[in-house]
Image (cartoon, rainbow, N blue to C red):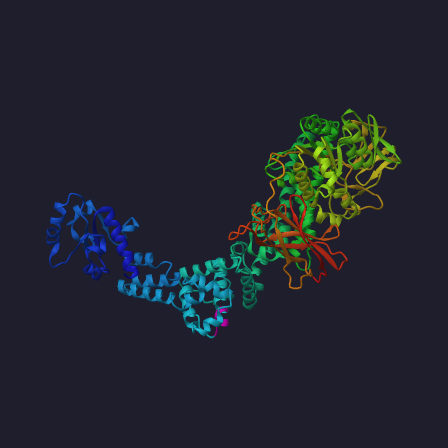
Amino acid sequence: MPIVTDTLLNLLRAQIKARGAVVWYDPERHYIGLAERLCSRDVGGADVHVYTPERGFLWLRRAVEPVWGSAVDAPRLLLYIPLPKTATQQALVEFEKAGVVMQPGQQPQECNTALSFVAHRALEGLFPAARLEALLEQVEAGKLSLDELDAQAERTLEDQAGVLKAIFGTGNPAEIALRFVADESLDAELVARAAQDNLAGLLGDLLGVAFPLTDLADLRARLARQLLTTDLLEAIGEALPAALQTFPLATQPAARETAVTLAETWRNRRDLTATYVTWADKIESALGLTTLALPLDVLERTETFRVGELALLTAIEQALLQRPTALLLTTARMRGDQGFWAQHDPALKTRWEVVAVAAEVLLESARVQNALKGKSWSAEALVGQYAYGDAPWSALDTAQRHLERDARRFDCDPGQQPALHQLVAGARQAYAVAAEALAQAFTQAYATANFTLPGILLQADIYQEHVAPRALRGRTAYILVDALRFEMAQELQRILDTTWQTELTAALATPPTITEVGMAALLPGAEHGLTLTESGGKVALGLPDATLRTRQERVTYFQRVVGEDSVVAKLEQLAPLADHQLGQALDKAPVILITATDEIDGLCESNPALARRMLDDVFNQLRRALKTLFNHGVQAVVITADHGYLFGDGLSTGDLIEAPGGEALLFKRRVWVGQGGTDAAGTLRIPITAFGVGGPYDLVTPRGLACFKKAGGVMEYFHGGLSLPEVLIPVLSIHATGGGAPAPGANIEWRVALGTATGGISTRFVSVNVAGSTAQLLPLEAPLVGVEVRSGAQPLSVPISASYGFNETTKDVQLAVAEDNATAIAPDTITLQITEEPDVATVTLYLLDATTGVTLARLDNVPFALTF
């Protein structure tokens, strides 16, 4: 049965089955020929009766009456009336009420017999949208009959079952178009089977425009241009520039919608993406779109061309400088995380990241300034606002840290990205103003409170209140991280395993906020009293039965007080754990002390430029160390720090304050401790005893963020003062809720390869192909992995994207088992950005288990020579 006719009969059969009697009105007489040919078996066994004007309604009723009157159940009847329903003067009203009326426009749509509706229902999916729309326009104009529609559908089916289906393996026009535009491998077969005209005709029907055929290369170029330009112009809408108004768009909306859908599918399908990028760049250049000026809202609607993404970036950067808004921030985050061009152009992705975090700094700066303006805050309230709640003010410091990291990774060129350069400068200035206001407010409020905040935990009480009680209940680890700022602990808490129970509390570090004081104040016994003193010509901290200055002195003291069966290790020894003897010790120790002294403080003081880019690595070390500890039966872990820090741009001479002079026990850019001397304006002098610390010394510190004049040292990283980022430290408690180490899965044979043709690294962005498989019968568990380029122990890279499974926060990649092979890892391509350029000829590429730091695979002696 022809397809349109068959669709109509299916509608009739369904209603006859459901309602028994169908009164079918056909005012346009589209179906009279069909009705006269129908027999009972065509319509589910119903009696078919066709009205004719010569015999009239009386004859029709008499013809139906024997069946209607004698049936016990509702009879199956089909009454065909080639008239409008209004012309019957209700002659068939009892049949209509007992059964159902079918006619053009009738609702529900299953009762609608309009030829255009039936044709659309029948041919949708068979004909391209543009051709179907054209056919329906002809039907509504009375230019196509039911028989003619059936004939066209039959010819289309024959075509689709013919040469193109044989070549492409499908008769779907959209799939044929995508395969052709992205793949030249079938060109020879198309020519050999003389199918070029068939293909050009199909594409013309699909997209509603003619495709003159010269050769297949030209046809492919025309198809690509039609798809991408239509995609762009449909997004632009009424704001169409004059230069693009002459482009031949399809007249039918359905055809334009088809082009847009195909363009979206082309760029979003992994197997086609590379060809989309190639063609988009070619067409962008051919159309001269580099000077295209479009409004911001229009640019947000399109992802067609790279130039549009660049224009949107610049527009967002300029808009943020004028008036930062949450909507602009959301747009920047979305385009950086999910946008097509960001996923396929690493430089664009990293630039979006800078824009987004600059927007965060601007918004957070404004929020903090507005909250402080014209209002008096207590020191305890400022700590609460900074550390707790759904929107703590510490987010300002997190955003600033991310800005400095991302801006240096991107390496903004003021000549090439002037708007971005201005945006970063504006964000830095906004941060400086807000952080200065907050520092002034807290220092003053802290002094007003006589440096006593009863509701806030003191550093000297952390061991007694948070570690000792847990150690009584089970095996406990105590991790001391030098300069783990409170906001960093907040970020760490967000990225930890969600099956772990975590609790974060803010505590006040012991002034002066330096390592020698803070680390000693974290030890057991500190709660009984502290004294600031001198040892070997340097600052030391006295506890009731010991004076401590160095790490070794602190470690020896800890084991003496806690017990010789406690274990002390460095963080780097646990992430990953390679020492078998240490592993055995961890299995038994009731209390474990883990120290991390160089990961933040040491790196920031020795190489601040590198520190900005690599500071986040401490998060990975801590996550891996936690996993190691829990796998060795530790039940609770407490992480804390000796002090926080300030990490800003280099100071100008206007930011420097004269030192107090006098006899100094300690002199750093943010703090002076000693006796005598004079104080410059903008500083605060406090007896050290005001902080509950014994000793004959005064502490002098700038009230805001300024520093003392001092020769030597870095001009970006500071601590020792009383601003919230320096004095507020975290106490992060973590409890594992699982059953220890997971059951081993199958051993995986990894395949890791660089995506470069040379097998070496010559650009700042490099792709790494990762896959794996196993021959074992054990369950294959796809791990969470990290990929790193290293020179010796120095990391040189940071992951920025992956084909799938990439975590934007942790930079880890969750691999997956292949859908079609339960013994294989689905291949993934991970993109790295090279952030360091050491003077070496070769480097090593590592595939790591992200949760433990264990090396899964590595490539040694990878050629390394960056050319740009």
Q: Which of 734 and 581 is in front in this view?
A: 581
Residue 70 falls inside the magenta stretch: no
Identified at 30% across, 66% down, the residue is 151
Please give left or right for residue 805 compared with residue 486 in the image.
left
Q: Is residue 284 above or below residue 524?
A: below
Q: Residue furthest top?
A: 528
From this viewpoint, is residue 730 visible? no
- Which residue occupies 66% across, 60% down? 416
Q: Is residue 275 left or right of residue 839?
A: left
| Quadrant for the C terminus in the image | bottom right
* Residues drawn in magenta: 215-220
Q: Is the magenta stretch mostly helix, strand or loop?
A: helix
* Rendered view: 690 above or below 172: above
Q: Position of residue 617 (x, y in %)?
A: 69, 46
Q: Which of 33 and 435 is in front in this view?
A: 33
Residue closer to the observer: 740 or 812 = 740
> In which quadrant of the rendered view does residue 499 lie?
top right
Residue 413 falls in image quadrant: bottom right
